[in-house]
Amino acid sequence: MHKLCTILANALWLLFSASALANPLVIAHRGASGYLPEHTLEATTLAFALGADYIEQDLVLTGDGELVVLHDIHLESTTDVEQKFPDRRRADGRYYVIDFTLAEIQTLDVHERQQANGELVFKNRYQSEGNFKVSTFREHIDLIDNLNRQFGQQVGIYPELKASDFHRDEGQDISRVFLAELRARGLDHPNARVFVQCFDAGEVKRLRQQLGLKAPLIQLIAHSQKELQTDAGLKGLEAVADGVGPSLSLILDREGGLTSFAKRLNATGLEIHPYTHRSDVYLSSNEAETQMFERLVNEAGITGIFTDFPDRAARLIEAVAR
Ligand code: G3P
Ligand code: CA
């Protein structure tokens, strides 16, 4: 009997240590967007092939109420909308996703992100035009489901609800449309391979408390969201969210040291998924990149990281994790 208890205790200890020591998750930010235009099905496929644990979908609504995978509520930074629909800009000069039907949006070609003057935001990323299209949330889920089935994997989805207030002002409730889709796919439960994310703290609360979201929920935190960074703010978050997605600059200071916020965060039970690791900006050398991961993984206690370069993030985590 004593021996049996010892064996059971050892097995439990091993189980506990294995989960306690799990490496941080690699979250492909807008797909493998360091290599292919963001949020395309191609970038998602590549993220899967490069070993991402989760793949992100930023979500906005079309005029006919379809969830499309785009980072902006505007179309001109990542598509050729100005050439295809020159007369459809609003008085502010912008082309809004919500002013177009899904069928219209599907005629657009997607390109690498550009500034207003036409210059590429990331100079060394994908260079040619390609034949990339805007796709729906449904298409992304189908693609990841199929790849999971064929490769025996369990890569998850990481949808972000964009601009809830803007959508409401336009007469649409993006959270309700999203939840209907999630539930239709059987993905609204605590063990689903899903993290739902949102910057809007009021909407995060609403999702959990009013709309009854059961899937894991992440509160994104930008530098300007000071209240969420206080002890009271973090305590409030523990009641509704499973974790936080803070800007990397809230975790590491300019010298690369841990911020006081990072230390306080690490003392909570919240998941910590900072954004965004980009090997081609901010980082002066391979050594600086390795040192950043060393700090994030072994000192800040991150449990995941958004990255434009999922293969590099996976390698760096593997290299530094103690
Ligand atoms: O959602 C995490 C990160 O993607 C937040 O920033 O602006 O890239 O959506 P953004
Ligand atoms: Ca995002």
Image: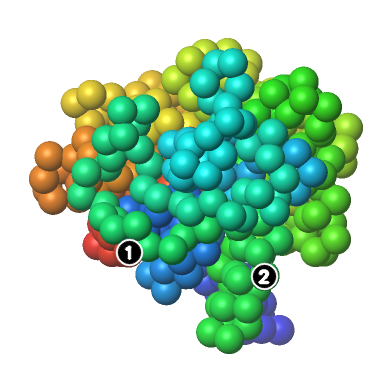
Q: Is 51 situated above or below 104?
A: below
Q: CA distance from mark 2 to mark 1?
A: 23 Å
* Residue 83: assigned label: none
Instruction: Please determine whether, in this image, residue 92 is positioned above or below residue 61.
Output: above
Q: Amino acid at mark 2?
A: Asp
Label 1 within 8 A of ligand 1 by Cβ: no
Q: SS class of the residue under badge 2?
A: helix
Q: Is residue 43 visible?
A: yes
Query: In the drawing, does residue 297 fall left or right of residue 135?
Result: left
Helix or strand or loop: what does disc 1 sit on? helix
Q: Which residue is mark 1?
A: 311
Which amino acid, by three-letter code, is at mark 1? Asp
* Badge 1: residue crowd in 10 Å (few <14, some 14–19, many ≥20): some
Residue 52 visible in the shown view = no
Residue 210: give x, y in percent of width and height. Answer: 88, 32
Is residue 248 found left or right of 42 in the rendered image? left
Q: Residue at x 38, y 42 (%)?
A: 113
The image shows a total of numbered marks equal to 2
214 to the left or right of 119: right
Dot 2 or dot 1, earlier in sequence: 2
Q: Which mark is drawn over residue 142?
A: 2
The residue drawn where x is 77% and y is 25% is 170
Q: Position of residue 317 (x, y in %)?
A: 32, 58
